[in-house]
Amino acid sequence: MTTEKIVMQQARKALRGNLSKLIAAAGLTMLAFLLVEYLEYFVGVLLGVPDIDSGEQLPFDNPAALAVALGFTAVLLLAMPLLNGFLRMAATTAVRKECASRDIFYYFRSAGLYFKTVLVDFLLYALWSLAAAMLNASGILGALMPELFQVDTPFTVQHYLTVLAAVVTVLLRVILYMLLVHYPLLAYALNENRSVGQCVFGTIGFSFRHFGQLLRLMFRFIGWFALCFFVVPALYVLPYFSVASLMSARWLLELDNGGSDI
């Protein structure tokens, strides 16, 4: 039996008695982020940011559009500790085989811990965004060959090239998430006493060394991820994958002498 199958089996066992709490926490987190997104659109409509007739967003060189985008990016970052709280619940499930519903607000319990968590999330987001911008296949292709994106006719070479560029961009962003964000978030969920620098930058080498393990685990979940197309299964898949990921990360951190102090 492979390591990934063992991890998934143990994750299913750990979920017994904890699944309903994790589903509720995942639902609350998703609802909060959706609320921020809808509020952004509502405020944008009030300020005339989206074109009501065409539905298109105004370019970001428009002051109102830029203000709305920056403002709600800040609001989203301030709400991010909810996601950290969900991962904390998944971490205690993975380590102790139990979790507490109140841990969804774990990182809100003190101002110091809250702002440290926001800083960790902000730096990870900034690092990922910078790398994603540099490896934006669609943007690079559009800059080199702008005429490709002026062709709307399907089933042409130009059309297939733009679709391929979009697919490559998405794949690169997933890989960047795996290399720059995944393990740092899990390491912080397992032990919030790690310094900000250790969480954000100290785990980059660890992420590269164990990229293969994460890739194999994600391939094991590919069928489950496909079910998320129907939205509702995501409420089960998210806790399942999170607990399995934290079990794997905990073992790998211990092997690297990082340990887990949860």
Image (spheres, rainbow, N blue to C red):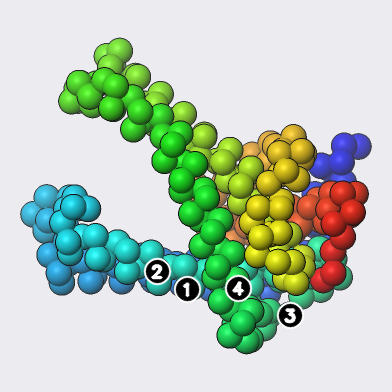
Amino acid bearing label 3: Ala
Residue 100 is tagged as 3
Which residue lies most toward the bottom here?
Answer: 110
Q: Nearer the viewer, mark 2 or mark 4?
A: 4
Please state the horizontal and vertical placement of residue 137, each as a whole percent of the image: 41, 29
Q: CA distance from mark 2 to mark 4?
A: 15 Å
Answer with mark 3 or mark 1, whichever residue precedes in sequence.
1
Which residue lies most toward the front here?
Answer: 197
Q: CA distance from mark 4 to mark 3?
A: 22 Å
Q: Is residue 195 above or below residue 244?
A: below
Identify the residue under disc 2. 74
Answer with mark 4 or mark 1, whichever residue precedes in sequence.
1
User: Is 76 placed left or right of 190 in the picture?
Assistant: left
Residue 78 is tagged as 1
Please state the horizontal and vertical placement of residue 132, each as a whole percent of the image: 46, 41
Which corner quadrant holds the C terminus? Answer: bottom right
Q: CA distance from mark 4 to mark 1?
A: 11 Å
Please state the horizontal and vertical placement of residue 191, each as a whole percent of the image: 77, 68
Amino acid bearing label 2: Ala
Which residue lies most toward the left here?
Answer: 53
Q: Are marks 1 and 2 in contact (CB under 8 Å)?
A: yes
Identify the residue under disc 4. 116
